Amino acid sequence: MIYFVGIGAALGSVLRYLITTTIKKNSRTIWPTATLLINLLGSFLLGILYGLSTIKAAYLIIGVGILGGFTTFSTMNVEILGLIESKKRIYAWWYISISYICGIILSVLGVIMGNMVK
């Protein structure tokens, strides 16, 4: 099973890289749009997966593997520090607030949708 989690994490990381580079190439903002979208989407998808009450193997592969590799808490924190160091503290606080509040809301909505589907 551990191999499937690893393969899933690799796939999630590649997806994150592709989305991040595409967004950064087409955006000229200091706002960390790519990481925010990735983390919010990951929260929503993980909520759906949780709400579906999938079997343990599927949860490990998709939830822990793919979505674990896809989302990135560490990158978010480095981006927050970068905003603070560049004296853009208001952006940092908005980023923190949106990431956590919307992440929780999207997770709950995902759980609700997952429960509706199953």
Image: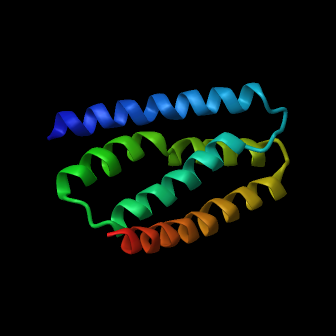
Image spot of residue 40 (x, y percent): 58, 55
Colour convention of the picture:
rainbow
Name the residue: 84% across, 49% down.
88
Relative to residue 13, is residue 67 depicted above or below?
Answer: below
Name the residue: 68% across, 48% down.
80
Image spot of residue 39 (x, y percent): 55, 50
**Residue farthest toward the left in the current orientation of the protein:** 1
- In the visual, does 59 lie left or right of 43? left
**Is 82 or 37 nearer to us in this picture?**
37
Number of numbered discs on residues: 0
Image spot of residue 14 (x, y percent): 46, 28
In what quadrant of the picture does the C terminus appear?
A: bottom left
Relative to residue 2, is residue 108 depicted above or below?
Answer: below
**Is 101 or 109 nearer to us in this picture?**
109
**Is 88 or 19 nearer to us in this picture?**
19
Name the residue: 67% across, 27% down.
22
- In the visual, does 16 lie left or right of 88? left
**Residue farthest toward the front in the current orientation of the protein:** 117
Name the residue: 49% across, 52% down.
42
- In the visual, does 10 lie left or right of 40? left
In what quadrant of the picture does the N terminus appear?
A: top left
- In the visual, does 51 lie left or right of 24? left
Image spot of residue 73 (x, y percent): 52, 49
The image quadrant that residue 31 belongs to is top right
